[in-house]
Amino acid sequence: MTDTSAKSADALTEATAYRRVYDLALPIFAAMASQTVLNIVDTAMVGRLGPTAIAGVGIGSFLAWLSATIVLGMSSGVQASVARRLGEGRNEVAALPLNAALVMVLALGIPTILLLNGLIPLIMPILADSTAVAAEGTPYTLARISGMLFLGANFAFRAYWNATERPRYYLITLVVTHVLNIFFNWVLIFGNLGAPELGTLGAGLGTALSLAAGTVLHFWFANRLARHHGFLAGWPKRDTFVRLAKLALPASLQEALFAGGFLAFMTIIARLGEVNLASAHILIQLNLAWILPAIACGLAAATLVGQSLGRGDIDEARRWGWRSVKLAMIVIGIMTLPALVAPRTLLGLLTTNPELVEAAVWPLWISALTMMGEAAGITLMHAHFGAGAVRRVLSIAPPLQWVLFLPLAALAVWAGYSFLFVWCLFIGYRALQTMILALSWRGAGWFNPDV
């Protein structure tokens, strides 16, 4: 073979590899796009209720997220375990980690919900630093927490569908869930179709009801399509629970520290006033919407990395991570263009309050400018999860958030610095995390052989 033909063959091989990442990530990305629409519509609906409602939902959404992390960690454990079993050719037991995850979601979720129903009304006024904001945020948070079991189950199913390279079932379920959420919000927030006008409580109930519908649909799909992998074929064995717990516990801790860090950040911003708190909620929702394609590429990478490691091919596993990063950066670079070109117009779609728009416009522009780097970090984090390297991520992300960023943010607010300055601190810490994760993926020891 000549050098030219060899190069052509290599280029074709790389093109095929990128196509595989694309084929895996596209259904996830499409589902995430529907989630983007949901988040934006959700924020826009609550935005019609005023800054106090937005601020209350902002605190409440992160408190609900933090509360749910006890069951969300199952997702990375299920995906890594299922993908590894498929890579090893053990197809008949591939769904056993999913079975174990569903049991653990029930065992952990029920007592957590009961405990939080008593705690949330007590801690919300402290976090919000405002009785008015707490009055809007408390019912929303309690309603969101009531759907915790469904959220945990949905994440476990998502991990299974992605690991088996059938994310279209996740896509179908998520689109149905989001359409129902928008409908329930329209009915319950504003009192349409004869329903009571529940405000922020309606927003929380709408989310919980839609998650329940999604869980039912996931079970229906899995009962038809996952039986050959051992879905609901019997009570999981002890070693399946132990292996899942070893992966899920660090992942849950990482998720809890991440969500708790956002909650702490919102609590710090609350000291800058209601308008800045509401602006921060809008900005974070846009940031979370932008990174969804990176999560999609990261979940695709997690599947491909896990399968490659199951075959013992470490170099190929590493290459899947970098390919996924490149794809994520291209997509997010395109998505952030409207915020770079017309930030005020974009913000005007989410709130009719001009004071909120002006407080958020420069932080939004800076976020859009740096979002491609954020995409690389999010993708590599999920690639580490696919390699079972949850502990490595745990040694990088939480210390940067809790030891570096949050103390600096609190000090800046205490010293009287502006909201824009504090937001730049947030952007800077995320950029540093991306650089460290990239160095980790280039180095050694980033996979766990015992998954």
Image (cartoon, rainbow, N blue to C red):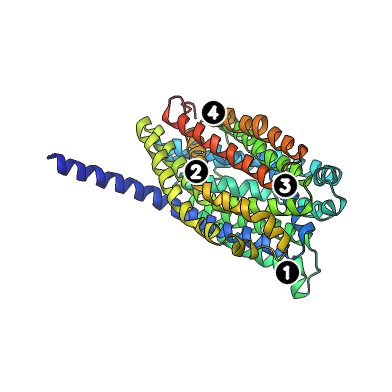
Residue 79 % position (x, y): 51, 40
Q: Which mark is residue 90?
A: none
Q: Could you tell me the amino acid type at mark 3?
A: Ala
Q: What residue does disc 1 label?
A: 187
Binning the other alpha carbons within 10 Å of mark 3 as few (below 14), some (14 to 19) or many (20 upward) gives many
Q: Residue furthest left?
A: 2
Question: In this rendering, which labeled residue sits more in front, label 2 or label 4?
Answer: 2
Residue picked out by circle 2: 373
Q: Amino acid at mark 1?
A: Val
In the rendered image of this protein, does residue 233 appear above or below residue 51? above
How far apart are labels 2 and 4 at the CA level?
20 Å
- Percent position (x, y) of residue 317? 39, 35
Q: Nearer the viewer, mark 3 or mark 2?
A: 2
Which residue is disc 4 drawn over?
Answer: 392
Q: Along the polypeptide, which appears first: circle 3 or circle 2?
A: 3
Work out how far the residue at label 3 is from the one at label 1, CA to CA, in angstroms.
22 Å
Callouts 4 and 3 close, C-beta under 8 Å:
no
Q: Is residue 100 visible?
A: no
Choose the circle earlier in sequence order: 4 or 3: 3
- Look at the numbered disc 2 and give the secondary structure of its residue: helix
**Please, what is the three-letter code of the amino acid marked with disc 2?**
Gly
What secondary structure is found at the residue carrying circle 1?
Answer: helix
Q: Earlier in the sequence, mark 1 or mark 2?
A: 1
Q: CA distance from mark 3 to mark 2?
A: 28 Å
| Residue situated furthest bottom in the rendering | 193
In the rendered structure, which disc, 2 or 4, sits on the residue that comes first in sequence? 2
First in residue order: circle 1 vs circle 4: 1
Helix, strand or loop for disc 4: helix
Q: Which circle, 1 or 4, is nearer the viewer? A: 4
- Residue at the far top in the pictured view: 445
Q: Which residue is mark 3?
A: 64
The x and y percentages for residue 427 are 59, 42
